Image (cartoon, grey):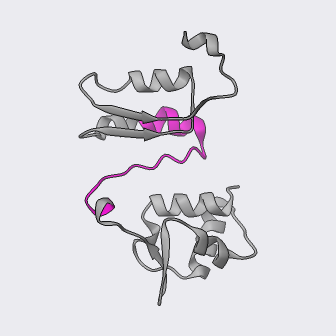
Amino acid sequence: MVKPKEAIEILWSKGFFKECKSTKEVEEVSLKDHGTTCSNWGVILKKSKFLRRDKKGWIQKYSSKTKDSNFIFINGVEPWTDRNKKFREFIDRIDGDVIIVDPYYGIGTLHILSQFPKNKKIRFLTSQMGSDEKEESFK
């Protein structure tokens, strides 16, 4: 089961909100695909950074920058699958520079970064070491 906010992020990343969706549609798909329930979907949808309210329902927000850019969103709901299957597919399809934003880093992070071709420009933004990591490993 996925939390409502995470369900919205997954739906957004799959393009579900490219066309207007009613609150009821979001509720039904979230329950069916992710087992997610919520007593007040309207509030959750309103707080979403990815969506805006339209006369017909909820639709993705676009800024001029995101219209012309390609983004791949790996949400971490399925950590092993995201890291070992989806990420490898991503590396094979990538064209251009890479920006990775992940609040935690560790030895596994360095392993994943080493899988990129050496001629790729990679920018990695992080803030703290994962709780399972030891600082001595990075010296």
77 to 111, vertically: above or below: below
Residue 67: image x %, image y %? 29, 63
Quadrant of res 133: top right
**Residue extending furthest bottom?**
55
25 to 84, vertically: above or below: below
Give the position of the C terminus as an image quadrant. Answer: top right
The residue shown at (45%, 80%) is: 20
Task: Compare residues 54 and 31 and report the one nearer the observer.
Answer: 54
The magenta stretch is 66-87
Residue 44: image x %, image y %? 64, 71
User: Is residue 99 rendered to the left or right of residue 55?
Assistant: left
70 magenta-colored: yes
Give the position of the N terminus as an image quadrant. Answer: bottom right
The residue shown at (66%, 63%) is: 4
Residue 121: image x %, image y %? 28, 31
Q: How many marks?
A: 0
11 magenta-colored: no
Residue 128: image x %, image y %? 60, 31
Quadrant of res 114: top left
The residue shown at (33%, 60%) is: 66
User: Is residue 138 rendered to the left or right of residue 122?
Assistant: right
Task: Compare residues 28 and 13 and report the one nearer the observer.
Answer: 13
User: Is residue 69 rendered to the left or right of residue 50?
Assistant: left
102 to 115, vertically: above or below: below
